[in-house]
Amino acid sequence: MKVLFIEYPKCSTCQKAKKWLIDHDIEFEDRSIVEENPTAQELKEWHHRSGLPLKRFFNTSGLKYKALELKDKLPSMSEQEQLDLLATDGMLVKRPLIITEGLVLVGFRPEQWEHLLK
């Protein structure tokens, strides 16, 4: 199974997730969300494949999210506007992301990963 791991290297949760992948002998391609932010098209595809609400792709605890007051603005934005906004800055995107051919995981939940990635 080909696994794309999208992370912010300085994020402690991403570091734990990366260690989890290594400890479970899961090979992955590593991609920094800051150096190579997901495009709106990638995010659109992943959103639809994940079955999750688009809001789950936002880093709601991030400083940028709060500074832009997105909690109040997102409900009135179209899906495309939200995707375009996410594509402007990797710090707005919830991480880590795991992308495989049949799976999109947002955030690190070890129990979920254990069940779905093994």
Image (cartoon, rainbow, N blue to C red):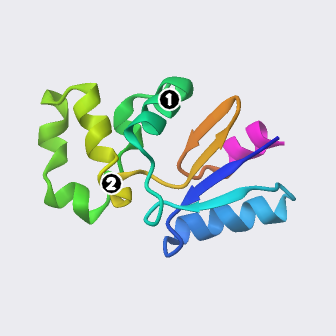
Label 2 CA crowd tier, 10 Å (few <14, some 14–19, many 20+)? many
Residue 100, image x and y in percent?
Answer: 69, 38
Front-lying residue, 109 or 102? 102
Left or right side of 108 for 33: left
Quadrant of image for the N terminus: top right
Please tell me the numbered disc located at residue 92: 2
Residue 67, image x and y in percent?
Answer: 15, 61
Q: Nearer the viewer, mark 2 or mark 1?
A: 1
Quadrant of image for the C terminus: top right
Number of on-image labels: 2
Residue 103, image x and y in percent?
Answer: 66, 33
Q: Which amino acid is tagged 1? A: Glu
Q: Earlier in the sequence, mark 2 or mark 1?
A: 1
Please tell me the numbered disc located at residue 45: 1
Residue depicted at x 34% and y 47%:
87
Residue depicted at x 65% and y 61%:
30
Q: Which amino acid is tagged 2? A: Leu
User: What secondary structure predominates along the stretch shown in magenta?
Assistant: helix
Please tell me the numbered disc located at residue 37: none
- As drawn, 6 above or below 83: below
Label 1 CA crowd tier, 10 Å (few <14, some 14–19, many 20+)? few
- Residue found at the far right of this picture: 25
Front-lying residue, 24 or 88? 88
What is the secondary structure assignment of the residue under circle 1? helix
Examine the structure image and report whether residue 27 is included in the region drawn in magenta.
Answer: no
Q: Quadrant of residue 18?
A: bottom right
Front-lying residue, 71 or 30? 30
Magenta part of the chain: 111-118
Residue 57, image x and y in percent?
Answer: 41, 42
Residue depicted at x 33% and y 54%:
92
> Mark 2 to mark 1: distance in Å?
17 Å
- As drawn, 78 above or below 94: above
